[in-house]
Structures are given as C-alpha cells and as structure tokens.
Amino acid sequence: MREYMPYGAEAPYIKAGPFKFRLPFIHYRFEIADYVQGLLMCAVCLGAIPLLQDTLKMPFEIALAIVVLNGFLYTWHTFLGDPVVPGWITPAIPLLVAYCLTFPEGHARMQGLVAFEITLGIFSILLGLTGVAGKIIGLVPSSIKSGIILGAGISAIYMIFKEGGKFEAMPMTTTVCLIVAFYLLFSNGFKRLSTKNKVFELIANLGILPSVLIAVIVAPLVGESAMPNIQWGFSSPDFVGLWTDWVPWGAVGWPTPVMFLQAIPTVLAIYIVLFGDVVQSKALVHDADITREDEVVDYNPNRAHLIFGLRNTIMGVIGPDITMCGPLWAAMQVVVCERYKKGRKSMQSLFGGAASFRFGTFTGYWLMPIVTLVQPILPVALALTMIVQGFVSVRIGVQQSTSFKDLGIAGVIAGVLLAKGSAWGLAVGILACLLCYGKDFFKGDTTFGHLWSEEVEAMTREDSTLEPDEKPALKAI
C-alpha cells in the first residue's frame, strides 16, 4: 500500500495563500468505500429538485443542472484544504423559502434569490479574509443564536407537515421511512446493536440511505408513486436553458440595490445558522483527529468561510440555489469520521474519505439509472432530510441557551421567526434581550446562567448517559 504521508504528519499539500491544494492519488488515497456510498447518497442531494420546482417553478432538467453545479463545488472543500463533507445550509432552507416567497413569482423572485446568495457569499468571504468570524458570532447573545437555530429547526419540520407540504404528497411512504430513519439514527438500542454486529454496523454507517431505498420499494406498493422507470445512459441537465433564462446575466437581469439591502436581515439570520454548522464541523473534526496519532488534521474556520463564501457567490451568478452552499453535511461527516477513527488501514486520511464521498455524489448525478431510480420518491428524500435536520437543529438550538431565561427568549424568537420571517425574528430577539438584560445585553443572564452551565457540564461528563457522539458538539458550545 502506497504511503502518502509519514506517520504523525499532515497530509501533503501545495501551499497557496490561505488554501492547501490536495489531489486524489497524489496527496491522499482514494477511498473506494466512501466513493460508493456517495454514489448512492446522491439521492438525498437530488431532493433539492422538488424545492427548486416548487419555489421557483423550474423544469426538472434546469433544477438538475443547478444540483450538478452545486455538486461540482462540493469537491472544492477538500481540494482547497477543508477536511469536511460539505452540504446544504439545511436548517435555514425554510427561512430562505419564506424570503423568496415575499417576491412575485418570476424574474423578481429569482432576482431576490440572486441578491441574497451573492450577499451571503461576499459577507462570508470578508469574514474569512479578516479572520473575525469567531469574534463576530461571539458578540451575538446566546438567546438570539438559540432562537434562530431553534426556529430554523421547527420551520424545517413545519415546512414538511404544513397544509400542502411534502408529507401530504406521500404520507404513508414518508411515515414508514421516518420510523426507519429515526430508529437507525437516534435509537440507543440500535446503537448498541451496531457495536456488536457487523451487519448492523454497516447499516449504521449508511446514514439515511436505507430509508431512501425503502421509499423506492414502499411508494409503489402503497400506490403513492409509479414504479421507477429505470433508464440507462447519462442524465441531461439543461445548462443552456439555465444560463439563458434563469441567471442574472441572462433573461432574469441583475437585482436592484434595494434588493441587496432587503436581503441583509435574512443573510444575518441564516449566517447564525450557518455558523452553528461551522462550530459543529470543528467539533467533529477535532473529535476524529484526537483518535488518530498518525495524521494531523488542520481545520481552519476562516478558510472554511472563504470556500463556502466563494461557492455561494459563484452559485448566485451561474445557478441560484434554494438549498445554499453550506460548510457541512453533518450526518455524512459523522459517518466518514467514524470510519476514519478505525485507523489508517480503514481510511488513510480524513481528506481521502471526505473527498471520495463527494466525488461519488458528483458521479451519481450523471448516471440515469440512479437519477431515474429515485426520481419518483424525491419528495420523501427531501422530507427525510428536512425532518432529521430539524431534529438535530432543535437539539443544538436548545443547547445554545445558557440559562432558562435565554431559552424563554429563544422560544419567542422561534415563534416569531416561523410566523413572520427572519427579519421580525431578529428584531424581536434584540428587543427582548434589551428589555430582559439591559446593560448585560451581550453577557446574557449573569445571575442564573451558572445553574444551566452546571447541568450541561454534568451531561458531558464521561459517566453521563449522553450518547458519545453528542458530547463533543455539546462541549464545543
């Protein structure tokens, strides 16, 4: 077996300013297992197509072109030195959908989306260049961070179950698949089984893929979809149509300066959700890194900001996307990290696992057998992704609060955000913190906060009942 790096060293790279260029077979080993898993898990990424069709009224082939472009940019993270499996800004999708729906259908709605995505991208790039990302988010009161993440999680769940939502399209299939997904992902009993049985361990490593495959079988059986019409060959994303009718330098036209200003409250709200993913990325990478003495893994939040900032800016120009370009696909990062922890024989470098997975998803978009297999159940794939992410976001949102008063304010913010949107949620949060904390606006509840902190500390002790994979993220708060 070829050795790509000496024991105890960082994976080799080519230095280029803040970036560290790495290529498969040259700087790290290509991991077949992760590539195959990515090939199948592209079904989840294709779940963005119904979102684009519903919100922007895009044809399937146009939406597929956007998914392919986003998938190509996913590979930039490991190429530029970020050891993660990137993904959507999933908890914030309902916030962006609500923002887009404030514009009339057609060119105005597309211009609003373009203004938002370019603004988010440039804002992230500036934070990465200046190195102040951590400092800025540290100034946001815990109750506001908690409320926005909590509200985003609840909005994700509400988006699926509201009248006319994806659940109504395929209720029986979605119910069956949710039961399977929650058991495989969150059941303590199944986690114990997966540590004792190789088959269960393999299933546990597949994330929500088993639930997606079950949907392919269940949906036709219960009459909620036709049998998949498997086609051979390669998919045909419509890049010509996209770049003629759906981009700012085509028929859509560039947003007005007022539209860029209108996007700022939503950008700020979604950035807080996004930064939660950055915190989680750092915690997951660190947890994996400390288990392996043979490789030093460098995770730099400022570099991550530069990469996903570039991705959002580029997509805003060549393929505006409702799912946005986020720093982390949390579920699959956990899967890759768990395999990495098993040692160099299992995965030589964390970069190899993360990169190979995203090469697999990018390949899958082009293969008609895979695209046509999952096309009938894309609403179920989207529902699974949103509800699982909602579950995780609510849990993380609650953990962001440092006191029960913080949590009360967060609940109010979440409710307003769900009913009125991110701008109202931010405004109510700022007012509530001013009224409750006054001169301690940035400090929060200094009187009773220690009681909450002691409870969190007790939860993260080695002898607590908290699941092992939850402790690193909780300690990172």
Image (tube, rainbow, N blue to C red):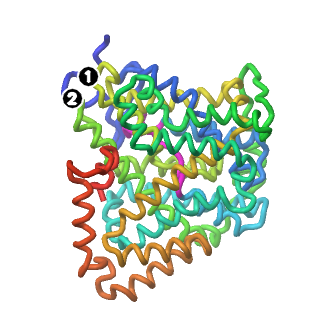
Q: Amino acid at mark 2?
A: Ala
Q: Quadrant of the N terminus?
A: top left
Q: Secondary structure at mark 1?
A: loop
The CA distance from mark 1 to mark 2 is 7 Å
Left or right: residue 34 compared with residue 347: right
Q: Where is residue 251 drawn, in percent x and y?
A: 78, 53
Task: In the rendered structure, find residue 5 and report the number of the disc placed on it.
Answer: 1
Q: Secondary structure at mark 2?
A: strand
Q: Is residue 274 above or below residue 341?
A: below
Residue at left offset 30%, top offset 59%: 477
Total marks in image: 2
- Crowd around label 1: few <14 · some 14–19 · many ≥20 (10 Å): some
Q: Where is residue 153 drawn, in percent x and y?
A: 52, 60
Q: Is residue 83 magenta?
A: yes
Q: Is residue 412 magenta?
A: no
Q: Where is residue 190 drawn, in percent x and y?
A: 42, 37
Which residue appears farthest toward the front when viewing the image?
189
What stretch of residues is rendered in magenta?
Answer: 76-91
Q: Amino acid at mark 1?
A: Met
Q: Is residue 286 above or below residue 106?
A: above
Q: Nearer the viewer, residue 424 or 318?
A: 424
Q: Where is residue 247 drawn, in percent x and y?
A: 70, 50
Left or right: residue 104 compared with residue 159: right
Residue at left offset 56%, top offset 27%: 39
Residue ID for mark 2? 9
Left or right: residue 52 compared with residue 398: right
Contact, mark 1 vs mark 2 (Cβ under 8 Å) = yes
